[in-house]
Amino acid sequence: MVLRQKSATSLGHLGLHHCIMSAFVEEAARCVASVVQSRNVDSMAPLRRESSVLRISKADYDLIRWEAERSYPQECCGIILGTMLGGQRLATMMVPCRNERIDAAYHRYSIPPEQVIAALKLARSRAESIVGFYHSHPDCPPRYSTTDLTEAHWFGCSYVITSVERGHAAATDSYVLVGAEERKKFQAEEIEIVANPQPLGIAL
C-alpha cells in the first residue's frame, strides 16, 4: 500500500507526514511488543514462526468481496480494524477507502493518508488497532505482486487480496507482512470465517 506524499510546500503537508510517520512508528512498536509478550521470551531471542490466522465474520468477508466486484475493473482498497494477539488477528470493522491511483487503478492502489489517519483515530476510540488492509486483483490471481510487497510497510498486519474474474469475486487469500524493512516478506495465513454475533461493522 502506498501512502502518497505530495510535495511538502506547506506546513500542513509536513504536519500530515509527521502525523502518519508517528502513528506508523507507534503501531510498529505495539506490534513488536505484542509478539514478544505473546511468546513470553527474551526480546533478543529469535522468534519462532507461528501459524498466522485472520479471523473475520462472514458478513465482513462478503463485504470485502462485494467491494472487489463493485470496483471492477479497478482495484478496490480498504483498512481492517480489530484486535491482535501473537499470530492471530480478529477483524471487527471494515473501512472502505478511495483508490487514489487514478492513473493505474486497474492494477495499483493507494489509500489517501487522511483516510489512514481517520482509521487510526477510529480504531483507538474502539480500543482497537489497524490489523490489516485489503485490495483486489482484477482478472489476476490473489497472489501478491512485487509492487504489493514493496509498498507494504505495516508489519504484523494482514494483507487480504481478492481475485475478480470478469466482474465476479473468485478466490480470496491473505498474507501477513513479516521480517524487517530491508528483508521483509509476505507469509501466507489462514482466513477463518467466524460467526457474526454483532451488527456488521462498516465505516463509510
Image (cartoon, rainbow, N blue to C red):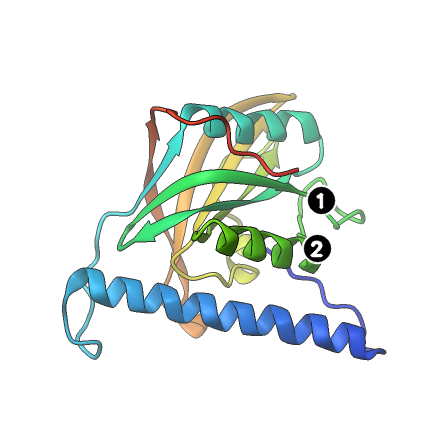
Element type at marker 2?
A: loop
Of 128 and 79, nearer the camera is 128
For the residue pair 142 and 122, the one nearer the viewer reads as 122
Q: Residue at x 50, y 57 (%)?
A: 149
**Image position of 183 (left or right of 105):** left
Question: Which quarter of the image is occupied by the C terminus?
Answer: top right
| Residue 80 percent location from the top left of the image | 50, 44
Q: Is residue 204 above or below residue 72?
A: below
Residue 147 appears at what percent x and percent y? 58, 56
> Looking at the rendered structure, which numbered label has been put on residue 112?
2
- Compared across the picture, whether 15 is left or right of 41 comes to right
In screen coordinates, is 133 left or right of 54?
Answer: right
Residue at 70 percent of width and 55 percent of height: 112
Question: Which residue is outermost to the left?
Answer: 41
Query: Which mark identifies residue 20?
Result: none
Residue farthest to the front, as pictured: 125
Quarter holding residue 40: bottom left
Residue 72 seen from this side: no
Q: Identity of the amino acid at label 2?
A: Pro
The spot of residue 148 in percent (x, y) is: 55, 53
Disc 1: which residue: 98
Left or right of 176? Residue 88 is left
